[in-house]
Image (tube, rainbow, N blue to C red):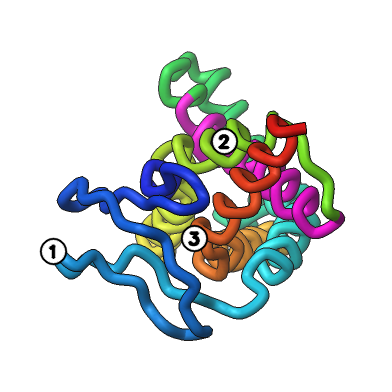
């Protein structure tokens, strides 16, 4: 977990070999490595917080059509059926697959939305020079929930379903599919473009300054 690497703004903990390392100011595109095991602690990137915020806001804009608009339109024997992400969870619930319906709703809707909101809260707060103690646990919770957000798995399930149904019916992609693809891409970019160590440095410095007042 990225959040476990930061002890404070001056000391880092290598989560591969547990070595305490003094934080250093490094130039852009340079890497800070653990001197004992060689693990790359982080790579210095340019303006990562504002980039991540832009991707996160775009992902939130894509979220509503991604879960409410039809992902695919199925035509079979003159009958047409549309299916969205929300309708899929409701169908599982109506068919009494309660556990599957709840897990699908959590992993493909609730958790990804909550993570985006947490990331938006932290990055937006830093961008506008706002700080609150809740930003620390918000960023920690954002990383803790990473394994529960399964947008990629749901997209893989859609692809498998399309391949299996191609020989049985005519399938047309819906607007929700393109919105979901954009949501998936923006969610990945919002995380990969962010340098979590930079965020932790800012949050911990603000916390220390606030505690010292």
The residue that label 3 is drawn on is 169
- Dot in front, 3 or 2: 2
Magenta highlight on residue 122:
yes
Measuring from the top left, give residue 143's x and y in whole percent: 48, 42
Report the residue at 47% width, 78% height from top. Answer: 26
* Residue drawn where x is 75% and y is 66% of the image: 54
Residue holding disc 2: 111
* Element class at badge 1: loop
Give x and y (percent) for residue 15: 26, 49
- Which corner quadrant holds the C terminus? top right
Residue placed farthest to the front in the image?
212
**Marks 2 and 3: in contact by CB < 8 Å?**
no
**What range is drawn magenta here?**
103-128
Residue 55 is labelled as: none
Label whose residue precedes the other's in the sequence (3 or 2): 2
Mark 1 crowdedness (10 Å alpha carbons): few <14, some 14-19, many ≥20: few
Q: Nearer the viewer, residue 67 or 140?
A: 140
Q: Disc 2 vs disc 1: Cβ atoms closer than 8 Å?
A: no
Query: Can you say whether 67 is above or below 177 in the image?
Result: above
Q: Is residue 6 highlighted in magenta? A: no
Per the image, label 2 sits on a secondary structure element best described as helix
Q: Position of residue 207 (x, y in %)?
A: 66, 37
Residue depicted at x 50% and y 25% = 101
Circle 2 packing at 10 Å, graded few (<14), some (14-19), many (20+), is: many
Residues packed near mark 3 inside 10 Å, few (<14), some (14 to 19) or many (20 plus): some
Residue 140 seen by the camera: yes
Report if residue 173 is visible in the image.
no
Alpha carbon separation for disc pair 2 and 1: 34 Å
Looking at this view, is 4 or 78 the one in front?
4
Q: Secondary structure at mark 3?
A: loop
Q: Main secondary structure of the magenta part?
A: helix
Near-viewer residue (202 or 179):
202
């Amino acid at each position: 977990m990225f959040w476990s690497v930061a002890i404070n703004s001056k000391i880092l903990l290598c989560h591969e070999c547990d070595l305490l390392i003094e934080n250093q100011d490094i130039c852009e595109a340079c890497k800070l490595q653990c001197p004992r095991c060689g693990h790359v602690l982080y790579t210095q990137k340019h303006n990562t917080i504002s980039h991540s915020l832009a991707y996160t806001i775009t992902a939130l804009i894509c979220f509503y059509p991604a879960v409410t608009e039809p992902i695919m339109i199925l035509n079979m024997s003159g009958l047409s059926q549309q299916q969205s992400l929300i309708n899929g969870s409701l169908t599982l619930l109506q068919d009494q697959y309660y556990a599957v319906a709840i897990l699908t709703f959590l992993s493909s809707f609730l958790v990804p939305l909550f993570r985006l909101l947490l990331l938006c809260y932290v990055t937006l707060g830093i961008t506008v020079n706002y700080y609150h103690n809740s930003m620390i646990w918000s960023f920690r919770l954002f990383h803790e929930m990473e394994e529960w957000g399964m947008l990629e798995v749901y997209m893989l399930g859609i692809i498998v379903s399309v391949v299996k149904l191609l020989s049985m019916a005519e399938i047309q992609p819906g607007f929700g599919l393109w919105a979901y693809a954009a949501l998936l891409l923006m969610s990945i970019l919002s995380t990969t473009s962010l340098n979590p160590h930079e965020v932790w440095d800012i949050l911990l410095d603000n916390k220390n300054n606030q505690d010292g007042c």
